[in-house]
Structures are given as C-alpha cells and as structure tokens.
Image: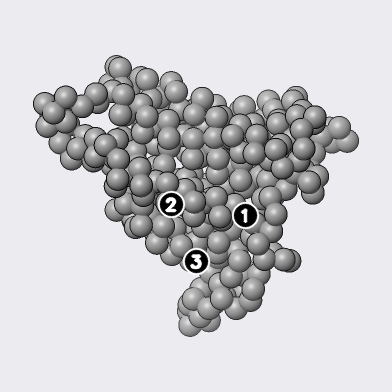
C-alpha cells in the first residue's frame, strides 16, 4: 500500500516525460471540460462529449488526407476547424430536440456516442483507411508536417496545451464578461426568472450545447494531430466522461474546471504508473 501510494503521488513528477504527460491529459480534459461546464451552468448536460471527440478526430483526419493543396500550417488550422465543426454537427440534433421539444439531452447525447463509434468504424473502413492496411481497420499515420509542434522535446506535449489555455481565457471572458454568460447563469439558476426577464431560453440552450460540442470535437482534433497521429477501432479513450467529472469538480466555473483538470490529469498519470510499478489491478486503478 505504501509503495502504491508513493508511486501515485511521486511518479507524475519523477521525470520530464511523466511531468509532460500530466499536461497531455490536461489539454484534452480542459478543452472538453470548459464546454461541458458552460452547458452545466445553463442547466443542460453534454454526456456525448466522447462521441463528439471521436467525430472531431475523424474529421481532422479526413482533412489531413484529402486537403493536400494548402500549406501544412494552413491545413493544420483547417483540421482544428473541421474537428470543432464535427463536434457541432454531432450536437445539433440533441440541442434542437432539447430546446424545442424538451427532450432529455442526457439520453440523446449518450446514444449518439454509440453512433459515433460506428461512424469511426465506417471511416476506418472507407474514407480514412490506410492504403497499406493489410485488411486491418487503421488510418494512415499523419506526416510530420501535419503534426502539432512539441513544446518539450522527447515528450508528447505539444502546442495543444497553448490552445487549451487560450480557450480558458476565451471562456472566462464569455462566461463572466458578456451578456451571454449572464443569460447562461440566469437560466441555470432560475429558468422561470430568466423567462420573465425576456431571455430567449431555447437560443441560449442551443448555443451552450453547440459550444460544448465544438470544444469536444476540437479536443479530438488536437489529440489526434498532437499526440497519437493515427486512428484505429480502439481509439475511444473515455476522456469525454472524465471531462464531465472535471467540470463538476470545478463547480462549472472556468478557473475551477482548470484546476480540476490539472488535479485529475496528475492522478491519471500517477494511477497508470501505480498499475505497472506496484501491480495494482486495472479495475482498481480506473474505478
């Protein structure tokens, strides 16, 4: 027990690589968590971030494979936009059903995760299948020119972290310094009061959910272009569900979500080391 606890607490800072891995996880969890937290402030749940993350990753890979006439830096930007756009498209149906018909967004977004997993299999067997796949469902590996640059050499930490921190600033200003942010908070706290104040509740709910979808899709594009460089059927990671925990632990605030993402990432890296170094069962580590 003592060895496992020591590994859990100290392994994330035991080497440069392990320390960088904290921020590799933080990048994805923070980007996703910010969008989920915004929705929670409006009283709506995005349980489909995992699916939007998958779709965003696939869309980024499609751009990488078929947009070949633009300079690599511009292609990377298009990949990020395509990832965010894929997340938005995946959220349109749940957002409209929730805002217009009062459908339960938890059920709709959760079910769309299953559809996204099948969409990944379809893409791997078609549009993004590697030319030399040998019958396996796997995509080509992104060329170096279409990978996000590294911040720390010999690690997996790239400029996706800068994108995540930039979004922290954007979401803080959006949440705390705009009328939209005020409307979101008002709806989340008292929907009847928001209606009495003349706030367009369906519009705010739709925008909140679409922003959550955009961040989840962007997280997928950032991860595939900055960390793993290829897709396969085992790609779904569970980040979308962990990000919900991050947003809730952060109290749905931007600063709280940022702190929660760091703490969660720290313990994820420590738990993975604890599993291998101390022989802790997988089921115990991830429950």
Identify the element where label 1 is drawn.
loop
Q: Specify whether 124 is left or right of 269.
A: right
Identify the element where label 2 is drawn.
helix
Picture layout, residue 163 above or below residue 273: above
Disc nearest the viewer among 3 and 1? 1
Label 2: which residue? Answer: 168
Label 3 CA crowd tier, 10 Å (few <14, some 14–19, many 20+): many
Q: Residue at position x 60%, y 63% from top?
A: 21
Label 2 CA crowd tier, 10 Å (few <14, some 14–19, many 20+): some
Disc nearest the viewer among 2 and 3? 2
Residue 273 in view of the camera: no
Residue that protrudes farthest toward the bottom in the picture: 2
User: In front here: 121 or 85?
Assistant: 85
Q: Earlier in the sequence, mark 2 or mark 3?
A: 2
Which color scheme is applied?
A: one colour
Q: Is the C terminus in the top left, top right, bottom left or bottom right quadrant?
A: bottom left
How far separated are the C-alphas under marks 1 and 2?
14 Å
| Quadrant in the picture for residue 108 | top left
Picture layout, residue 37 above or below residue 62: below
Residue 8 locus on image (x, y percent)? 51, 73
- Disc marking residue 159: 1
- Disc marking residue 244: none
Identify the element where label 3 is drawn.
helix
Label 1 CA crowd tier, 10 Å (few <14, some 14–19, many 20+): some
Residue 225 in view of the camera: yes
Label 3: which residue? Answer: 266
Q: Specify whether 11 is left or right of 146.
A: left
Callouts 3 and 1 close, C-beta under 8 Å: no
Q: Residue at position x 51%, y 57% from top?
A: 26
How far separated are the C-alphas under marks 3 and 1?
19 Å
């Amino acid at each position: 027990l003592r060895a496992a606890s020591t590994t859990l607490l100290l392994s994330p800072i035991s080497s440069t690589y392990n320390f960088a891995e904290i921020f590799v996880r933080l990048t994805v969890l923070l980007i996703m968590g910010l969008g989920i937290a915004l929705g929670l402030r409006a009283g709506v749940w995005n349980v489909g971030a995992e699916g939007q993350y998958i779709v965003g990753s696939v869309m980024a890979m499609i751009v990488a494979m078929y947009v070949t006439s633009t300079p690599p830096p511009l292609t990377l930007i298009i990949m990020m936009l395509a990832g965010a756009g894929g997340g938005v498209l995946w959220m349109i149906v749940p957002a409209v059903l929730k805002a217009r018909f009062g459908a339960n967004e938890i059920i709709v977004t959760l079910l769309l995760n299953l559809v996204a997993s099948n969409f990944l299999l379809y893409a791997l067997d078609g549009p993004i299948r590697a030319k030399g796949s040998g019958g396996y469902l796997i995509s080509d590996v992104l060329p170096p020119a279409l990978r996000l640059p590294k911040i720390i050499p010999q690690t997996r930490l790239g400029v996706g972290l800068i994108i995540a921190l930039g979004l922290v600033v954007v979401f803080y200003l959006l949440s705390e310094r705009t009328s939209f942010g005020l409307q979101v908070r008002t709806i989340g706290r008292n929907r009847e009061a928001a209606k009495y104040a003349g706030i367009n509740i369906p519009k705010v709910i739709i925008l909140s959910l679409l922003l959550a979808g955009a961040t989840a899709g962007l997280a997928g594009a950032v991860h595939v272009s900055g960390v793993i460089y290829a897709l396969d059927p085992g790609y779904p990671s569970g980040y979308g569900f962990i990000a919900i925990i991050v947003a809730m632990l952060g109290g749905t605030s931007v600063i709280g979500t940022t702190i929660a993402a760091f703490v969660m990432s720290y313990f994820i890296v420590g738990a993975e080391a604890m599993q291998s170094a101390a022989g802790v069962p997988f089921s115990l580590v991830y429950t």
